[in-house]
Amino acid sequence: MSDIKKAVLAYSGGLDTSVILKWLQDTYQCEVVTFTADVGQGEELEPARAKALKMGIAADNIYIDDLREEFVRDFVFPMFRANTVYEGEYLLGTSIARPLIAKRLIEIAAMTNSQAISHGATGKGNDQVRFELGAYALNPNIKVIAPWREWDLLSREKLMAYAEKHGIPVEMKHKQGGSPYSMDANLLHISYEGRHLEDPAAEAEESMWRWTVSPEKAPDAAEYLDLEYVKGDIVALNGTKLSPAQVLAKLNELGGKHGIGRLDLVENRYVGMKSRGCYETPGGTIMLKAHRAIESITLDREVAHLKDDLMPRYASMIYNGYWWSPERLAIQTLIDHTQASVNGWVRVKLYKGNVIVVGRDSKTDSLFDSSIATFEDDKGAYDQKDAAGFIKLNALRMRIAANLKGRK
């Protein structure tokens, strides 16, 4: 007899988590609480409530939470303050949503006196690591049930057979094969994996992409966009004040319209394998380019270089599930400290898959001094003769080495 009396399930209402719900009831003989997170995936979530009710879940054990503002404000924006990119390309759209879902799972477990949480991540992927590291960091005593590591339902056919046997309602798209891709969407991105994409030499089908037009079909006229920054975060677009979630939604709309943000990537997964995925991150692509532009005039050179040194490690922490770790929190404190001066505006031009910075300014924090940087007469603001001593001092060690080589 299991000592788990109640478990909170991260529940989408799809085939996998519907099977898990019934499997938990049968295998653990426990009461199940369902949690469905709205992080901007663009799907109607109320059907998940109806399916949970149909499967015997009490109404007060069904949680459907709108987390879009929290997601962008407390997870996406802090990540972009660091200009975060994994392996030079990936903007971590899936990775950054997982710590928020883990946080909410733990909160609901506490509210409902549940002893365990459960998720539908497979035993092959990164998400199992992200969910569970986050959960243990927030509640070290929580029990985690990962069905894909326990059951023998390791194929779609077996899942379908289990659903049919137990009377679990399955949508027609599942019966007909559904999408040819495994997809994950939130306000930051949409990802595609599996099937056709498992051949890394095969070009993704144009019909796959959902958020962006191809650059070839993007408008022939460029569009200009002004982004206003306060302490490293975007607070307004073209003069209109917006909430964090509204900012990202609008940037996605504009970026998608101009064919911005497509990525075809073979990445190194935490569990050791290489995996090919395609991503659409139109808003994030604009944010990354614009944020670097405003930092270029507001950050001290060495502070900017320090941030660049730390970024790959910070990106790996997020990718590998260490959002709640002390090292990520420590680096975030440093990053946020640097953003106090990142105030001003950036103007970008959106054109056929490109984000082109065409202007930036900060009336309060700009370190750009035109009287020094000018190629015209600077009236003594900068003494070129000073460079001679600097160059000689920095060349000294190389001159010594060259002289030694010459004597040999």
Image: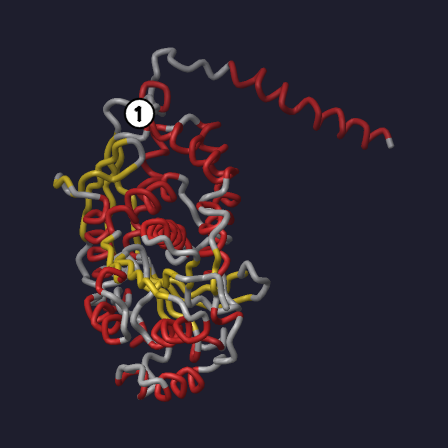
The quarter of the picture where the C terminus appears is top right
Residue flagged by tag 1: what amino acid is it? Answer: Ser
User: Where's residue 7, x and y in %?
Assistant: 39, 61
Element type at marker 1? loop
User: Where's residue 254, x and y in %?
Assistant: 20, 55
| Residue 354 lies in quadrant | bottom left
The residue lying at 51 percent from left, 14 percent from top is: 386
Horizontally, is 212 left or right of 157 in the view? left
The residue lying at 37 percent from left, 33 percent from top is: 296
Q: Which residue sits furthest left?
A: 240
User: Where's residue 97, x and y in %?
Assistant: 36, 54
Closer to us: 98 or 349: 98
Give the labeled residue for mark 1: 366
Closer to us: 145 or 268: 145
Q: Is residue 83 visible?
A: yes
Closer to us: 59 or 408: 59
